[in-house]
Image: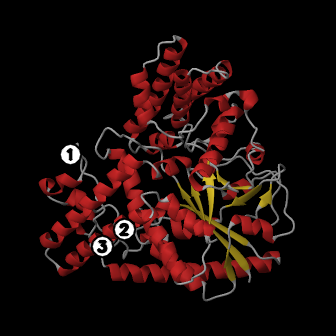
Amino acid sequence: MNGYFVLVLHSHLPYVNHPNHDLYLEERWYVEAVLESYIPLLMMFDRLQERKVPFKVTVSLSPTLLEMFRNAVLNEKLKNYTQKLVELCEKERERVKTEQEKELANFYRERFLSCLSYLDSVEGNLAKGFKKHAESGNIELITCNATHGFLPLMRHQPFAVEIQITVGVETFIQHLGFKPKGMWLAECGYYSGVDEILRKYGLEFFFVDSHAFWYADERPYFDVYRPIMTPSGVFAFARDPDSSEQVWSATTGYPSDGRYREFYRDLGFDGDYEYVRPYIDKSGVRVNVGIKYHRITSKETPLDRKCLYSREDAMAAAREHAIDFLNKKLAQVNTLIDTFNQPPVIVAPFDTELFGHWWFEGPEFLENFFIEASKQKQLKFATPSEIIERFDSYQVLTPADSSWGNGGYFDTWLNGKNDWIQPHLVEIRNRMKRLAETYFGERDPLKVRVLNQMLRELLLAESSDWPFIITTGTSVEYAVNRIKTHVKRFLDLEQQLLKDNIDEQQLARLEQEDNVFASIDYRIYAGSHIGKEG
């Protein structure tokens, strides 16, 4: 054995819940991720387990995603919409003209039916599927901070960082029944000192981007190919840049191969408007429905001239690329073991949604990678906890402040487009802290409900997704509205509390819509009462 491979899949979506509407436009983020990534990956894990193919994957499940997994209303929408897609596929089998298109329509129908069957098998809660593989030892599940808040921008309010971390840990325990050993810091956002807070809450490791090691207070001897221990005793794992480029890159990576399915050509946009109208957004806005008949063909080929997708050719490409990736990893570990005279640790973290949603054949690529890797003995799959146990000594270093965002630092979440957000968050955090301390002994159930809901609104406003969306220019209006809505709800509830004039009907509506973290207790925001976890 010449080296270890640590595959990490970070699974996160911002909390989107609109219970008083039919499937809301932004709720489709969840529907697409479930149908195209989470269920296909879980079914792939099942197949590997049935075939007794060894595999190890580290999966982070963000607290907001876990909360959506068990949201009965949202999952009923998911199920109903999937049934409508089955209906659409049946219509498509009659509408399309070529045999190749008919085969694809049937393929999509069977795929959606399989997703429905899988949802039934886990009673609608995908956390059960992930937990099953964690219990078998194939997956190490880890948590993320509460609402994926970008922690480096909270460093001057360390109490806010602590709440993001402790709520992340507690939510994980509530959903999965055991305490996580590691945490995915949202956006790999690290700043010196956050590891001390992780240690306080019993967390043993986290992940950073490559340059966090390269610009650490001292250059690591093993570069990014061995975790380091921070002065607080928590381990940091750094991303391998080569693996990221080979898999992630849209221009040079595997997903750009012309045989793979074209993401941007979809029946929801191609179909006659009246025909697809029952399956797109209720507003009439065209959206992807997940039925796509075309392949990438080439980067130069216009969308309207793409060739038809061949599932057989795409599966051949996925196997070829899996073998190529394995060979590259074997060559890499053989070079590194010669350099360091010790087995290297290659850490490859990705957004889970890359596999299936953005790269449709991604789950099959991973499946083939594990199958092919099982035939050799030079590269061994491992989880972070196993790596920590494997070696006797570690270099003690402080990583550089960093993220995995564009440019590697913090400007994705703090720039001229979104810097207006921060003063509002700073202010309502301070207000929440004062109120938590003032009302710490409150016994009036109605006031307790108000304070708990205020904390939910604050946490939801802190999501890193909103400034990210504003920076990238996608769904900007929705992101801006979400921030302003949560801040306004917080301030409205504060006024009702201070004036002792609580609108119970409005409170109930907010509790129904922003219903994350059902058991949260606002008192955790009282500074002198933080840090009792141990």
Inter-mark Cα distance, 2 to 1 = 29 Å
Q: Position of residue 30 (x, y in %)?
A: 41, 52
User: Circle 3 sits in a helix, a strand or a loop, which is it?
Assistant: helix
User: Quadrant where the N terminus lies?
Assistant: bottom right
Query: In percent of the image, x 36 and y 40: which residue is there?
Result: 18
| Tally of numbered tags | 3
At x 38% / y 52%, what residue is drawn?
75
- Nearer to the camera, 464 or 509: 509
Q: Specify the label residue 193 is tagged with.
A: none
Is mark 2 in CB contact (under 8 Å) with mark 3? no
Q: Residues within 10 Å of mark 2 (few under 14, many from 20)?
A: few
The residue that mark 1 highlights is: 284
Report the amino acid beneath label 2: Ser
Residue 189 falls left or right of residue 62: right
Is residue 315 among the parts visible in the rendering?
yes
Instruction: In the rendered view, tell whether residue 71 sits above or below residue 386.
Output: above
- Residue 277, given in percent of the width and then of the height, sits at 17, 52
Distance from the alpha carbon under mark 1 to that under mark 3 = 27 Å
Between marks 2 and 1 in the image, the one whose residue lies nearer the viewer? 2
**419 lies above or below 346:** above
Report if the CB atoms under discs 2 and 1 are less than 8 Å apart: no
Q: Residue furthest top?
A: 499
Residue 288 visible in the snapshot: no
Question: What label does residue 110 carry, if any?
Answer: 3
Of the two numbered discs 2 and 3 on the same chain, state the one appearing first in sequence. 3
Which SS class for mark 2?
Answer: helix
Taking 77 as reference, is 132 above or below it? below
Residue annotated with mark 2: 117
Q: Nearer the viewer, residue 154 or 173?
A: 173
* Picture residue at 23% right of the left edge, 45% below the top: 282
Q: Position of residue 116 (x, y in %)?
A: 35, 64
The type of colouring in the image is secondary structure
